[in-house]
Image (cartoon, rainbow, N blue to C red):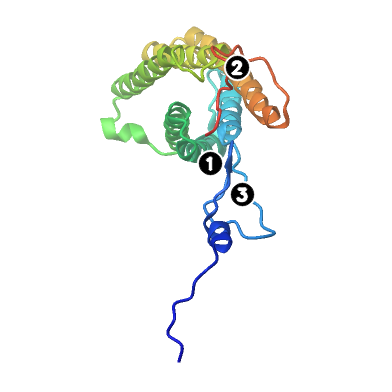
Amino acid sequence: MNDKPIVESSSTLNNLAAIEMKGSCYSSQPVLPNQYAVRAGNPGPLGLFSFALVTFVLSVFNVVWPDAPNNALIVGGIFYGGIAQFIAGLLDFQHGNTFSATTFCSFGAFWTGQGFLMLPINFNAAYAGDTEMWAQGLAVYHLGWVLFTYMMFGASLKLKKGSVLLSILLFLVGTTMLMLAVNIWTGNTIPKRIAGVTGLLAAFGAWYAGLAEIVVEDGMTFPVGAHNTVVVHERV
């Protein structure tokens, strides 16, 4: 029996170990002859579109029917605005976009929670039927999201990959949360209608931002007012 070790040629070893990395195209598998590297997609549009749709529907209710139940959002809020957006955030972590990943995961979790709150479950029972205390708790919860969103708004002004559009969107979302908190605390429908208007502006802006990130892959650009000369979700 021949016990000599098998020696691979240097060209074969190079082919087996090669990993093509160019822009966002990469493959963690060996690049063999007649194979192509896997192109990683941008999860940003998914996160923006999922946020935009549920925000749009909720905002229409807040403007037109502020006192009507919005249970029509249960499924969309949990699965599209919530889970889909959360997944987009996880994928953005893989692309090294910490800011957008944190934003998508946070608001994905928020919308999943909002969807559960819309379920026909008596959550107020935890407060022994004290509706005023339940409202105060919800208001404080929304105020926490106001602080988070305005904090991210401030950070967006300093991002190297930031844009004027991104900053405006976060400011609108923070204002929407603030108006909803005031509505919950006071029971006045005027802040809720204002939240509907700012929410609609945020929804349309998020749709536009998502389209801008889709067309940029084909060499087209939509103006977003970039703070620098890079796109919002430039991938590594």
Q: Position of residue 165 (x, y in %)?
A: 57, 14
Q: Position of residue 58 (x, y in %)?
A: 56, 24
Task: Look at the numbered disc 3 and give the secondary structure of its residue.
Answer: loop
**Between disc 3 and disc 2, whose residue precedes?**
3
- Please tell me which residue is depicted at 57% across the width and 28% down the height of the picture: 48
Q: Residue reaching furthest left?
A: 128
Q: Position of residue 143 (x, y in %)?
A: 35, 17
Quarter of the image where one finds residue 219: top right
Please name whichever residue, 61 or 111, is drawn nearer the observer in this view of the structure: 111
Q: Is residue 175 left or right of residue 219?
A: left
- Neighbours of disc 1 within 10 Å: few (<14), some (14-19), many (20+): some
Task: Look at the numbered disc 1 and give the secondary structure of its residue.
Answer: helix
**Marks 1 and 3 close (CB-CB < 8 Å):** no
Q: Position of residue 71 (x, y in %)?
A: 54, 33
Q: Is residue 193 above or below residue 120?
A: above
Q: Quadrant of the N terminus?
A: bottom left
Q: Is residue 22 left or right of residue 3?
A: right
- The residue carrying mark 2 is 200
Task: Look at the numbered disc 2 and give the secondary structure of its residue.
Answer: helix
- The residue carrying mark 1 is 79
- Please tell me which residue is depicted at 60% across the width and 31% down the height of the picture: 45
- Neighbours of disc 2 within 10 Å: few (<14), some (14-19), many (20+): many
- The residue carrying mark 3 is 38
Please name whichever residue, 105 or 80, is drawn nearer the observer in this view of the structure: 105
Q: Is residue 4 above or below residue 223?
A: below
Please name whichever residue, 71 or 31, is drawn nearer the observer in this view of the structure: 31
Residue type pointed to by label 2: Leu
Please name whichever residue, 126 or 191, is drawn nearer the observer in this view of the structure: 191
Residue type pointed to by label 3: Val
Residue type pointed to by label 1: Phe
